[in-house]
Amino acid sequence: MIITCPYCGPRDSSEFVYREEGGRTRPDPASTDQAEWNAYVYDRLNPAGDHDEIWQHAGGCRSHLRIMRNTLTHGISSVALARDHGRPHERRSRETQA
């Protein structure tokens, strides 16, 4: 599988490390809701088709990338820097500050 890094260009997937599902919302760090934390740590989607993922270019520029990958074909439809997308909880906090 070839992943096109925005900085380094097309690279083999062996240079990258899968980090997590994209778009997941992390519970409030001060939360003591065990069920909420268990769901965040252990529950994962297992879609057959397009899947939003976070990867790190560990063997290159070390950037975190947001990749839309088809889990059936391993075809990649989009790659962008993760920092350009933000996380859902980061977007909410920015909106409430404005």
Image: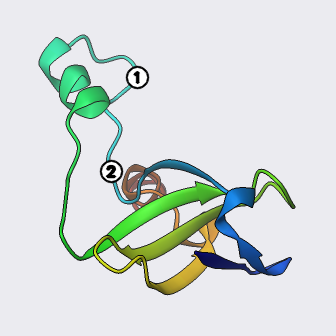
Residue 92: x percent and y percent?
37, 56
Q: Amino acid at mark 1?
A: Pro
Residue drawn at (44%, 62%), measured in percent from left and top?
A: 53
Query: In the visual, does 29 lie left or right of 8?
Result: left
Label 1 with label 2: CB-CB less than 8 Å: no
Which tag, 1 or 2, sits closer to the chain's start? 2
Query: In the visual, does 88 lie left or right of 87?
Result: left
Residue drawn at (28%, 75%), measured in percent from left and top?
A: 72
Residue 6: x percent and y percent?
75, 81
Query: In the visual, does 88 lie left or right of 82?
Result: left
- Residue underneath mark 2: 24
Residue drawn at (65%, 65%), measured in percent from left and top?
A: 13
- Residue underneath mark 1: 29
Query: Is the residue 64 above or below the residue 2 in the image?
Result: above
Residue drawn at (76%, 75%), measured in percent from left and top?
A: 11
Q: Quadrant of residue 63?
A: bottom right
Query: Is the residue 41 above or below the residue 80 in the image?
Result: above
Q: Quadrant of residue 74?
A: bottom left
For this orientation, the residue located farthest to the left is 35
Q: Nearer the viewer, residue 53 or 36?
A: 53
Q: Nearer the viewer, residue 98 or 33?
A: 33
Residue 34: x percent and y percent?
18, 12
Residue 22: x percent and y percent?
40, 59
For this orientation, the residue located farthest to the bottom is 77
Quarter of the N terminus within the rendering? bottom right
Please say whether residue 12 is visible from this viewpoint.
yes
Please say whether residue 98 is visible from this viewpoint.
no
Q: Amino acid at mark 2?
A: Arg
Label 1 residue SS = loop
- What's the CA distance linking mark 1 and mark 2? 14 Å
